[in-house]
Amino acid sequence: MTEFDREEYERRKRAIFEAMSKRGRERILKIGYENWDPFQEPKDPRERLVSTSAQQATLMLKEFLEATDMKEYVNSYYGELFELLKGFLDGNSRCRVIFSLCQWYYSKKHNLNSPL
C-alpha cells in the first residue's frame, strides 16, 4: 500500500469510527482500534456448507440414518445434528461439553462407572 493509499485508508477508517454510536466505538476500542478493519470482506456463508468438516458431518449423518431407525427424528432435527457433528469435527468446546453431558447422563442412567 502506498503512502497516499495508507492515508486515504486511515482517513476513511477514522470517518467510519467517528460516525458510529458510542456503544459501537466502545466495542471497537475493546478489540483495539489498530486491529479493527472496517473494510474486510465478509465471510462467505457457503464456506460453512462446503468445508471438510461439513462434508464429513453430512456423511456421518447419512451413516447414522442407515444404522438406526430414527429417520423421522433425524429429519426433524437435521440442522441441529449437522451443527453438532460439525462442531465435534472442528473441536468446538460447546459440542464437547454437550457430548460429555450425554456420556455422564447415559452412564448415570445405566449405573456405569466408566470415566469420561
Image: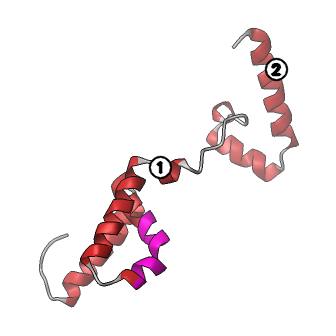
Part of the protein shown in magenta = 72-83
Task: Locate the C terminus and report the quarter of the image it occupies.
Answer: bottom left
Q: Nearer the viewer, residue 115 or 72?
A: 72
The part of the image, by quadrant, that contains residue 102 is bottom left
The part of the image, by quadrant, that contains residue 15 is top right
Amino acid on which the number 1 mark rests in the picture: Val
Q: Position of residue 55 (x, y in %)?
A: 39, 54
Q: Which residue is mark 2?
A: 8
44 sits to left or right of 71: right
Which element is circle 2 on?
Answer: helix
Q: Position of residue 22 (x, y in %)?
A: 82, 50
The residue that appears at 40% across and 78% down in the rendered structure is 74
The residue that appears at 83% across and 29% down in the rendered structure is 12
Query: Label 2, label 1: how many angstroms apart (C-alpha)?
Result: 36 Å
Q: Is residue 112 magenta?
A: no
The residue that appears at 32% across and 74% down in the rendered structure is 65
81 sits to left or right of 69: right
The 10 Å Cα crowd at callout 1, few under 14, some 14 to 19, many 20 or more, is few
Q: Nearer the viewer, residue 83 or 93?
A: 83
Q: Which mark is residue 50?
A: 1
* Majority SS type along the magenta span: helix
Amino acid on which the number 2 mark rests in the picture: Glu
